[in-house]
Amino acid sequence: MTVNQPRSGAPCKISPRGASMIMRKVPLLKPAHVQARLKFANDHLDDPEEEWEKVMWSDETKIELFGLNSTRRVWRKKKDEYNPKNTISTVKHGGGNIILWGCFSAKGTGRLHRIEGRMDGAMYREILANNLLPSVRALKMGHGWVFQHDNDLKHTARATKEWLRKKHLKVLEWPSQSPDLNPIEHLCRELKVCIAQRQPRNLKDLEKVCMEEWAKIPAAVCANLVKTYRKCMISQLKGVSSLRRVCVSRAPPLILLGGEEEDGAQGPREKGRMRFHRLQNVQIALDFLKQRQVKLVNIRNDDITDGNPKLTLGLIWTIILHFQDVLWVEQSDYDDDITSQGDTGKPVAMETPRMTTQPLQSA
């Protein structure tokens, strides 16, 4: 058998479609989460860079003592796989971990705080008072800065909202299940890589290393994360692969992506891969939306095919609002129910009002 033996000559060149890629881990999204993410992108896609420079980003992260050692690689001979210098010592459950709260802005990193025990709303407000506000003053954020945190229950508790209101802090409205939209995740990843390289021996040493490595992060790195935030947001939300996950009930707009019509029948579709095939498929979808009385202004098939982010996201959001899952009650059925139930019958569920949207303007 020579199937596993090395062969002579250069290896075969494969196309991007033939290359094996690592599957990305993403949050489990419900329809409400998808709508919130699209709305967030549609609302902030055109925000200037100066607006993001006013944001103080924050999040909590878990750092394990031996968390990233499994990602290391080594050059060795096949028979030396168990040589001590080519192995990694492991312990169960990562050898323990610590939970950290941190923040940063375009001007640099703020304070990093270790969370002792289980955090509740009172502890979170204390962390904000002792770390967030001093970080804002140290980074000279000035007036008009905006605070970002996710929708954790401790963050959205009534007492926390009241504390933020008394401190006159403006909070960025944030979609749930969207950690990938927070640029601080990149800093946390780099922090974990640097910690793994230093190999702390215990939790006390781990905390010390975390503080040192966090303080070493250059302000230029933070500024670049904020500068490229719009591009990262587009890459997260505009791809067709991510739009296929929009699982709105009975959603005819899926025909736009080559899906099925409302009654389950497969819509007409060009099977080619050329650009004119894509243009034809998008035009079929736009004609379908026109028949369903979805008013779209100045949207051409080439805008969607070429990936115009503003028009594409606006179109998807408009379709979601138009085709939201509602309970339709036929007038005849409604009259029959009223007659059969009489005066003592229970009220019949009425039709949910349809939300209306303004016509989408051109870019």
Image: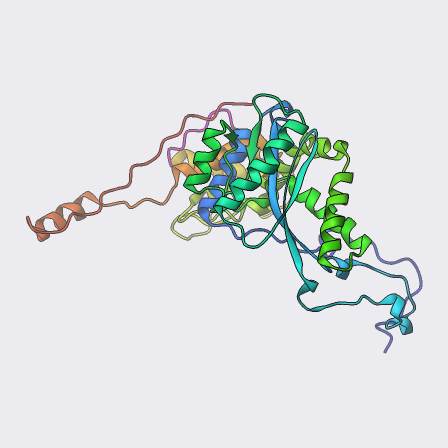
Residue 11, image x and y in percent?
A: 87, 58
190 or 357: which is nearer to us? 190
Q: Is residue 90 left or right of residue 101?
A: right
Quarter of the image containing the N terminus?
bottom right
Instruction: Please tell me whether residue 299 is drawn above or below residue 266 in the rendered image.
Output: above
Residue 248, image x and y in percent?
A: 43, 47
Q: Is residue 186 left or right of residue 143?
A: right
Magenta stretch, residue numbers: 292-303
Quarter of the image containing the C terminus?
top right
Taking the view exactly as shown, the residue that stands out farthest to the left is 343
Taking the view exactly as shown, the residue that stands out farthest to the bottom is 1
Q: Give the residue at x 63% y 23%.
A: 50
Display colour scheme = rainbow
Question: Can residue 288 be spotted in the picture?
Answer: no
| Among the 4 quarters of the image, the one containing residue 287 | top left
Residue 349, image x and y in percent?
A: 22, 47
Q: Is residue 110 on the magenta stretch?
A: no
Question: Can residue 271 be spotted in the picture?
Answer: yes
143 or 314: which is nearer to us? 143
Residue 196, image x and y in percent?
A: 78, 54
220 or 357: which is nearer to us? 220
Q: Is residue 15 left or right of residue 177?
A: right
56 or 19: which is nearer to us? 56
Q: Give the residue at x 58% y 26%.
A: 145
Q: Is residue 300 on the magenta stretch?
A: yes
Q: Main secondary structure of the magenta part?
A: loop
Instruction: Please tell me whether residue 7 is drawn above or below residue 344 in the rendered image.
Output: below
